[in-house]
Image (cartoon, grey):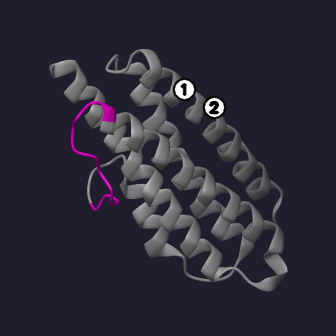
């Protein structure tokens, strides 16, 4: 029973950080100009990806008969980066938006890495998280490449 509770806790942490990621990208979308339509499209895609991730994780937690986290985090080191992203957008400069998004992507990448390495997940839980981590790593790398190529 304790293992199921710990698995649910790990999954709930990932639900929270995905919800934070959604909020961060939505804030970034609001701060972009029409000339950044490529980023708007990408950020919408990544928001949808996190919605899908949260939904999949929610279904897994529900199977454990544990409480499902439905909100976003307000504290905790794993989740602060996206809260900071939402709070620190100060302009419409493409590079600074991408820098802040990369910081958020770094945090979610670390959260997934920690979830996979702490030994609390097995079977379907591990497979789902590993698949999401792989997709998220690609998003991280894309944001980083865009940041590196921006003026």
| Quarter of the image where one finds residue 28 | bottom right
Residue 7 percent location from the top left of the image: 29, 27
How many numbered discs?
2
Q: Which residues are magenta?
A: 63-74
Q: To which residue does mark 2 refer?
A: 134
* Quarter of the image where the C terminus is located: bottom right
Residue 84 percent location from the top left of the image: 42, 65
Q: Is residue 37 left or right of residue 21?
A: right
Q: Is residue 53 left or right of residue 141?
A: left
Which residue shows up at 55% across the image and 81% down it?
90
Kindly report the secondary structure that dominates the magenta region of the rendered protein: loop
SS of the residue under disc 2: helix
137 is within the stretch colored magenta: no
Which residue shows up at 32% across the image and 48% down it?
77
SS of the residue under disc 1: helix
Mark linked to residue 102 = none
Residue 20 percent location from the top left of the image: 44, 59
Residue 113 percent location from the top left of the image: 48, 29
Q: Is residue 51 left or right of residue 136?
A: left
Q: To which residue does mark 1 refer?
A: 130
| Quarter of the image where one finds residue 31 | bottom right
Which residue shows up at 52% across the image and 22% down it?
127
- Position of 50 relative to 113 (above/below): below
Q: Is residue 18 left or right of residue 132?
A: left
Which residue shows up at 33% across the image and 56% down it?
70
Q: Are marks 2 and 1 in contact (CB under 8 Å)?
A: yes
Badge 1 crowding class, 10 Å Cα cut-off, few under 14, some 14 to 19, many 20 or more, is some
- Position of 45 relative to 111 (above/below): below
């Amino acid at each position: 029973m304790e293992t199921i509770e710990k698995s649910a806790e790990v999954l709930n942490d990932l639900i929270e950080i995905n919800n934070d990621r959604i909020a961060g990208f939505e804030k970034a979308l609001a701060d972009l100009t029409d000339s950044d339509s490529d980023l708007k499209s990408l950020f919408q895609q990544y928001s949808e990806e996190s919605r899908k991730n949260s939904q999949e994780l929610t279904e897994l937690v529900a199977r454990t008969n544990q409480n499902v986290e439905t909100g976003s985090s307000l504290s905790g080191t794993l989740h602060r980066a996206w809260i900071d992203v939402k709070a620190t957008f100060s302009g419409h400069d493409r590079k600074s938006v991408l820098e802040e998004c990369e910081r958020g992507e770094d945090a979610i990448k670390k959260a997934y890495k920690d979830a996979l390495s702490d030994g609390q997940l097995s079977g379907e839980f591990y497979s789902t998280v590993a698949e999401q981590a792989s997709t998220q790593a690609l998003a991280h790398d894309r944001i980083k490449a865009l940041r590196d190529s921006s003026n």
